[in-house]
Image (cartoon, rainbow, N blue to C red):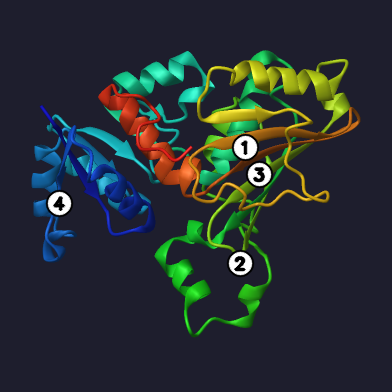
Amino acid sequence: MALTVFIDGKEGTTGLRIFERLATRPDLTMLTLPEDKRKDPAARKEALHAADIAVLCLPDAAAKESVALAEGSKARILDTSTAHRVADGWAYGFAELSQEHRRAIMEGQRVAVPGCHASGFISLVTPLTMAGLLPKDTPLTCFSLTGYSGGGKKMIAQYEGVDRTADLDSPRQYGLTQGHKHLPEMTHIPGLTTAPIFAPIVADFYSGMEVTVPLFGHQLRCTHPMDEVLACLKAHYAASPIVKVLGPDEVAVKGGFIESNALSGNDGMQLMVLGNDDRLQIVSLFDNLGKGSSGAALQCLNLMTGVDETMGLNL
């Protein structure tokens, strides 16, 4: 029997991409609302209570409202917003972090999809803290370069509209007060004692993301940082069909450059270790709309419904 899925907020960038991928699935029945009812609380509540799985693609406040509307229903909830990523009772939707994370997604009633920048940072740092190579009290910094689609429909319209302004021609740093909404999960999930310094930058390309965490060799509890960090990441993700760790010979560096949009349109993630034993850069490369958003949500939904986690993913 097909499961019923309701996407609350399917008109947004993430919701639309998820809907398009699920609409042709024979194991799922998509529940939709007419345009004039999609923001109506009563209609949304009815849909939430009729669904087996509700996918929330909404701003934080609206996502919290949907969770309240779903109270008393049978619906399992998959939330793509920031609202519940470090909340009690919610599974964190990055299955590759541990078997406990995977089981929590598979069995959970409430699952939060990770943030895009956060996915890159956490994919790099968490295996190192779990293995004891990186002390959890290490002061860290994170640089993240993203395409403009991460800003949603409004930002896409700014970059692609006829009234585009000249300032959009240059990469732009934001989150200038060190209060970015991804910082709580970037701190909590790897178990850090202090939030990292985080420098996100949006640039003039549609999608793709490159997240870099620089490290000094003396910050790590190991003798040969380059080899041991690479070995740690390779061991951690060895069984993953989605997250791949590249060795030095596999890093596709063209003329000494890494293209931030190299995995645009792809739902996978590539990790690499660059530099030398004194000064390292660990890098996560992926699509902000893929493993950083709708691809991650689809992977979680697959795990929640008991099918192959890669079903419908572009790898």
Looking at the image, is mark 1 or mark 2 earlier in the sequence?
1
Q: Which residue is mark 4?
A: 32
Residue 72 % position (x, y):
12, 32
Specify the label residue 143 is tagged with.
none
Looking at the image, is mark 1 or mark 3 earlier in the sequence?
1
Q: Quadrant of residue 113?
A: top left
Q: Is residue 179 left or right of residue 173?
A: left
Q: Which residue is mark 3?
A: 211
Q: Which residue is mark 1?
A: 121
Question: Three-letter amino acid code at disc 4?
Answer: Thr
Q: Residue at x 71, y 42 (%)?
A: 212
Local secondary structure at mark 4: loop
Question: Three-letter amino acid code at disc 2?
Answer: Asp
Q: Which residue is mark 2?
A: 204
Real-space CA distance between mark 4 and mark 3, rounded to the nearest whole angstrom: 36 Å
* Image mark count: 4
Neighbours of disc 1 within 10 Å: few (<14), some (14-19), many (20+): many
Q: Residue at x 51, y 17 (%)?
A: 98
- Please say if the residues under marks 1 and 3 sit with CB atoms less than 8 Å apart: yes
Neighbours of disc 3 within 10 Å: few (<14), some (14-19), many (20+): many
Looking at the image, is mark 1 or mark 4 earlier in the sequence?
4
